[in-house]
Each structure stands twice: as C-alpha cells, then as structure tokens.
Image (cartoon, helix red, strand yellow):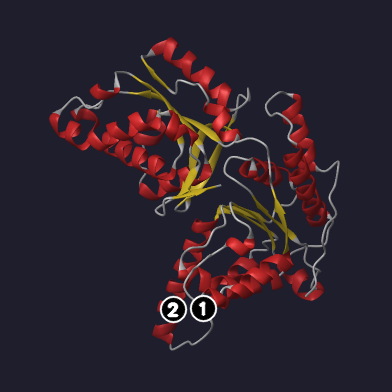
Amino acid sequence: MSTTTPSPKTDGPVSAAYTALVARGVLTGDPAQQAAARLLDGVASGLEGGQHSGFLARLIERPEPIRGLYLFGEVGRGKTMLMDLFFANVAIKQKLRVHFHEFMDEIHAGIAAFRKRAKAKGDDSDPVEAVVKPIVKSGLVLLCLDEFHVHDITNAMLLYRLFDRLFAAGVTLVATSNVAPDGLYKDGLNRELFVPFIKLLKERTLVAALPAAQDFRRLKFAGQDVYFVGTGAAARDAMDRLWLRITGGEPGAPTSFESTGRQIAVPLTALGAARFGFGDLCEKPLGSRDFVRLSHQFDSIIIDDVPQMDRTRSDAAKRFILLIDTLYDRGVKLGASFAVPLEQLASDDKTAFEFRRTLSRLIEMQSEDYLAQGLRATGSGEVSA
C-alpha cells in the first residue's frame, strides 16, 4: 500500500504553537526546531484532512495512509517538546502517545495473555494479529512513540510483524529517537532479520534529523540551586522561581497520566516538567509501575514540602525511597524543598538505614554532572531522548 507524504507547512498548528512559545520568551527560536515543526504540521494537515474515519468506514474505504515522521537527534535538542506540541495540537481524537518501551510491554503482555487463552482452547491463531485487532477496532489513527530504540532481541524480532499490520490498518506513526533508523539494534544478534523492519519504517515515515544548536534540557538547570532547605513562604518562593526557570516562565496547568488502568493527577505541568507536593506522590497508594510511568512522562520534576521521615511516615518514606531510585535510574532532573537538611531526613534508626542509598543519590542529583546528563533508558544505562 502506498502512502501520502504530507508537504511541510508554514502555518500549521505545531508551528503556530512553537511561534507562540518563542514570542512569550519561553523558547529561543531555533531553525532546526522550526523546520521539524513544519514537518509535523504536514503530518497534522494530512491527518486532519478527513482521510481517516472509523473502523468500519476504514474497512470499506481503505484510505491511503498518511506517512508519519521519525525524528532523531542528540539528547536535549527538543524532540520531546516538539512531540508535546504536535500531540496537543493535532485535531484528531483517535490518537495515542506512549513511551516506546511501555507500548512494547503492553504488546508482550497481550501476546502472553492470548497464548494462555489459546492454549486452553487449542487455538493456533496468530498472536500478533490478535493483539493488533483491538487496537485497530479502537479506531486508532495516530500512534506517537517517544524514545524509539531497540536493544532487546524479542522486540527486534517482533517489530516488523507488528508494524506491518498497524500500517496496513492505516495507523500513522510519529516517533522520536536518539538514533537514525539504520542505527537501531546496531550489532544486535541476528540483526539481518531486523533489517526488513528498518526498510518498512523508512517507507512509512519521513526520517528527519533534528540538529538543534543547543542542549535545551541542560540550559534549564545551568547554574541553578535545585534544592531548598526550609518551610513556609521562603520555600514556596524558591520553588516558584525554579519552576518558572525550567518552564521558561510558563505557569503550567493541571493534567493527569494513565498508569495501570487509572489516572494519576499532576497538579502542574509545562514543557516536560511536572510539579507535585510530597503528599501527591508519597502519601497516596502509588507503586513502582506508577513511578516508572511518571519518569517516562516528564524529564524534570519538582517536589514541594518534603518532610522529615519519622516512624509515623514509614509508608511515605518507603515510597519516597522508591521514587528517588526510579527518578535517579531514569536520569530525571529533580528540584525539591526539604523541611530539614538531607542528612536529617530520616529521624529514626530503621528509616536512616534504608535511606543511605537515597541520601547518596539525592546528593548526586543536585550535581552539575548529573544535571548535564540526558535521560537514560531505564535499566539499560543508555542515554535517551
């Protein structure tokens, strides 16, 4: 099936949103980012042109797919920010945005569940087809995947079968990555079996580099004190100043994100950053999967009013330890206000023992070296988009 390659636009929704941020002083205009915004405008225009409709209509009409975009470039050059603008401003409802590895985890879970049911029924149907079918039935038109990278052989061997079906159903892919398609699964086992997917990816997406001039993520934190010790108005004012620094002056707005079938409230978010009170994250029934999802949603997090951890806060202390471990492993930037100095956060012997690694990580997370790093692919140690 052929694809329609949208032409770059100069007045589309992504360019308009980008220009508005520059005009407000939130961003400094960058020619490479502006060019990428125009490419995303082209995809948005094609999707909004009425060429896609519901599941039944798509079966009858078999619309010509809209070619997507694969945007790659070095850490901190604005790929995620542009994806934010694109996803928020493309005027279609049948869209999904998710981190690449979370998407693949869901696909693998669906395949495992199908195989379990199929074994009991003696069903020898294709599990990939079975997993794709409900996605197509949902009417999905646009799939946005953040941080597309492939190291696991299981994913490598699955991707062609999966995306061949998705593309055939008219799904458009927009993805961000640190590497060009030819760099995916580099030196991987049986890589020759992965090459057909690279060919398919190039056919169904326009591949574009983002050679922006600066590491914008690093500039957010350059020369900043990211921790404040104290309470009350002074702490709030310090965190307000840090928040406006990393969001370019944007006050932010409430939102939520989905995790394990429920919505997690985010009091404030803007330009890839999120702001929470300690109670929002550590005094609610959140767990490891929620914090991993959080770390994939945002590159910077501010936490207000972290208290001293005594025996009455043992559950909150355990969540705080898990949260910091997750943010550290991912490379998320942290700003926080603490009621007491870091070495006094744990006020009883049991909590203090469990806190040793957390204290070490908190100290490192305010260092220039840590703040200059990009995000890491969780569990792999690789710097990511």
1 or 2: tag closer to the N-terminus: 2
Seen from the viewer's position, the closer of residues 368 and 153 is: 368
Task: From this view, report whether residue 360 is shown above or below residue 342.
Answer: below
Q: Which disc is residue 243 wearing?
A: none
Q: Amino acid at mark 2?
A: Arg
Residue where numbered disc 2 is placed: 115
* Among the 4 quarters of the image, the one containing residue 59: bottom right
Residue 166 in sight = no
SS at circle 2: helix
Gap between marks 1 and 2 measured at Cα: 7 Å
Task: From this view, report whether residue 197 is shown above or below residue 359.
Answer: below
Q: Amino acid at mark 1?
A: Pro
Please report the residue visible at 81 percent of the width from the left and 69 percent of the height from the top.
64
Image coordinates for residue 315, horizontal then vertical, percent: 26, 37
Mark 1 surroundings within 10 Å by alpha-carbon count, few (fewer than 14), some (14 through 19), many (20 or more) = some
Q: Which disc is residue 127 wearing?
A: 1
Query: Residue at the left extreme?
Result: 349
Q: Is residue 196 left or right of residue 306?
A: right
Image coordinates for residue 167, horizontal then vertical, percent: 69, 69
Please report the residue visible at 47 percent of the width from the left and 62 percent of the height from the top.
105
SS at circle 1: helix
Image coordinates for residue 115, horizontal then vertical, percent: 44, 78
Please report the residue visible at 67 percent of the width from the left and 26 percent of the height from the top.
26
Residue 238 in sight = yes
Q: Is residue 78 left or right of residue 108?
A: right
* Among the 4 quarters of the image, the one containing residue 31: top right
Task: From this view, report whether residue 182 is shown above or below residue 304.
Answer: below
Callout 1 touching callout 2 (CB < 8 Å): yes
Q: Is residue 332 left or right of residue 164?
A: left
Image coordinates for residue 367, horizontal then vertical, percent: 40, 29
Can you say which quadrant of the picture contains the N terminus? bottom right
